[in-house]
Amino acid sequence: QVQLVESGGGLVQAGGSLRLSCAASGVFFRINAMGWYRQAPGKQRELVATVGSDGSTMYADSVKGRFTISRDNAKNTVHLQMNSLKSEDTAVYYCAAELWVIDGSRDYWGQGTQVTVSS
């Protein structure tokens, strides 16, 4: 079965950096868009950044200039480099991807990784 597995979360001080990674595994033909979402306690899940199959990127205004999303198509991975972290970046971060599988295109989600920024 298709799986998205995240890694790289943790505890960091404000102003610090973290790098999240997500690897897709299983049986699929192609990966379209990949992205990162986050959900803070008591808040709705929100989009952080996406990267298309052509490498085009999109960022939430709150992370522009601080976060960078990238993907490695050969390794079926997506990364999120997070710099200048703020306490408001504290959340569970989820990887998401649109994959072409045997019965069509489907969205998949990772299990989430906790990012905690201490002030």
Image (cartoon, rainbow, N blue to C red):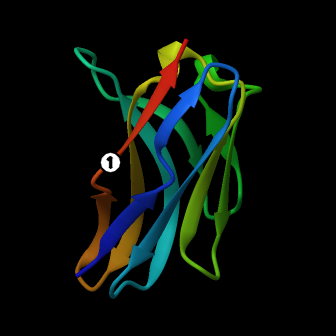
Location of residue 38 by image quarter: top left
Which residue is pictured at 39% across the width and 53% down the height? Answer: 96
Which residue is pictured at 71% across the width and 58% down the height? Answer: 55
Nearest to the observer: residue 6 or residue 59: 6
* Left or right position of 119 against 84: left
For label 1, the residue is 112
| Total count of labels | 1
Percent x, y of residue 9: 47, 45
Near mark 1 (Cα within 10 A), the count class, few <14, some 14-19 or many ≥20, is many
> In which quadrant will I find the C terminus?
top right
Location of residue 67 by image quarter: top right
111 lies above or below 57: below
Percent x, y of residue 109: 30, 55
> In which quadrant will I find the N terminus?
bottom left
* Left or right position of 60 against 11: right
Amino acid type at mark 1? Gly
Which residue is pictured at 42% across the width and 58% down the height? Answer: 6
Percent x, y of residue 118: 51, 18
89 lies above or below 34: above
Which residue is pictured at 77% across the width and 26% down the height? Answer: 65
Q: Residue furthest right?
A: 65
Percent x, y of residue 4: 36, 66
Nearest to the observer: residue 34 or residue 95: 95
Element type at marker 1? loop
